[in-house]
Amino acid sequence: MAEAENCTHNCETCGEDCPSRMAPQDFLEKPHQLSSIKKVVGVVSGKGGVGKSLVTSLMAVGLQRRGKHAAILDADITGPSIPKAFGIKEKATGSEDGIYPVRTKTGIDVMSINLLLENDTDPVVWRGPILAGTVKQFWTDVIWNDVDYMFVDMPPGTGDVPLTVFQSIPLDGIIIVASPQELVGMIVEKAVNMANMMNIPILGLVENMSYVVCPDCGKQIKAFGESHIDEIAEKYGLKVLGKLPVDPHLAAACDGGLIELYNGDYLDAAADQVEAL
Ligand SMILES: Nc1ncnc2c1ncn2[C@@H]1O[C@H](COP(=O)(O)OP(=O)(O)OP(=O)(O)O)[C@@H](O)[C@H]1O
């Protein structure tokens, strides 16, 4: 059990009766004093590469199209994909007051580690506490001006870094993104249980790469087998907010920095849910 004087504030390692044990809300960090952020939504996945950044980008684009001011905090420090999806080439700037996010073509404010690194290809070879500290600084040291909806592209998984982010940024809700393969295993359920343990409302589930549409006959092909998302949603009393197909246009838009030009209403129900917060 951790003693109070050498407490690491990582309550995973100490006992229930540890005197330094804190309630989850005690870890919450305050945003920059010049920031104004109305609602914060985390986009979470049980593991990497399932399309979490793509869903984060589409959510911000969707809310911005509805006349709201959207922002993205890219908390995926080791795999930052947001600047690429929006084709952001410039770097973030700062003043003695703080750091300013970079604005996309349609007015979405973005902060990502790639906007601070000299070269986009520089790897971030940092240990967990530094990664988590950087995400915290994106919240505390960045001046987020008049944001209606901030989407946080969370680090994948349920390890130390996502845990710290969950504890330090006050999330109004999370969206869990999963691929059909993941839904067969327990990875999504781990993410659901983690959110429940942290008392963060789950707005719903999004299944990415749910199906492929045959270019000749338009038939939906379940390339990864039948979907299990409805079963899991029912088991945990959650909403299914959308099912995205594998779409080459989507991949091209995302990889070509043109995500703001992509037309598709797959995440309309998710946007409704966020607006209802
Ligand atoms: N539905 C889809 N159709 C076509 N391509 C997709 C789809 N979803 C994701 N992709 C492509 O898959 C790649 C990975 O997506 P993305 O970066 O969003 O995943 P991620 O879960 O955020 O990964 P990581 O956790 O490693 O950052 C991207 O190149 C993206 O364009």
Image (cartoon, helix red, strand yellow):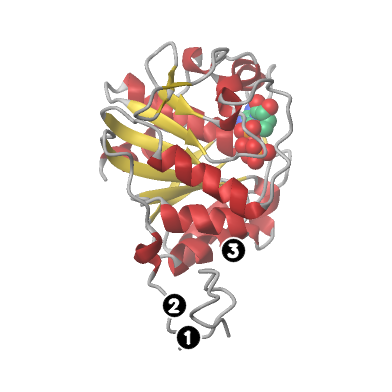
Task: Give the label, 3 or 1, closer to the camera.
Answer: 1
Does 253 appear above or below 243?
A: above
Disc 2 marks a residue whose amino acid type is Arg
Q: Tell me, for residue 190, which label it has, or none.
A: 3
Disc 1 marks a residue whose amino acid type is Glu
The answer to which of marks 1 and 2 sits earlier in the sequence is 1
Q: Is mark 1 within 8 Å of ligand 1?
A: no
Mark 3 → mark 1, Cα distance in angstroms: 22 Å
Count of numbered marks: 3
The C terminus lies in which quarter of the figure? Answer: top left
Q: Tell me, for residue 143, which label it has, or none.
A: none
Give the residue at mark 2: 21
Q: Residue at x 57, y 34 (%)?
A: 53
Residue 26: image quadrant is bottom left
Q: Is residue 42 left or right of residue 255?
A: left
The N terminus lies in which quarter of the figure? Answer: bottom right
- Asked if the residue under mark 2 is in contact with the one under mark 1, i.e. CB atoms within 8 Å, the reply is yes
Circle 1: element type: loop
Where residue 257 appears, as percent x and y from the top left, is: 58, 15
Disc 3 marks a residue whose amino acid type is Lys
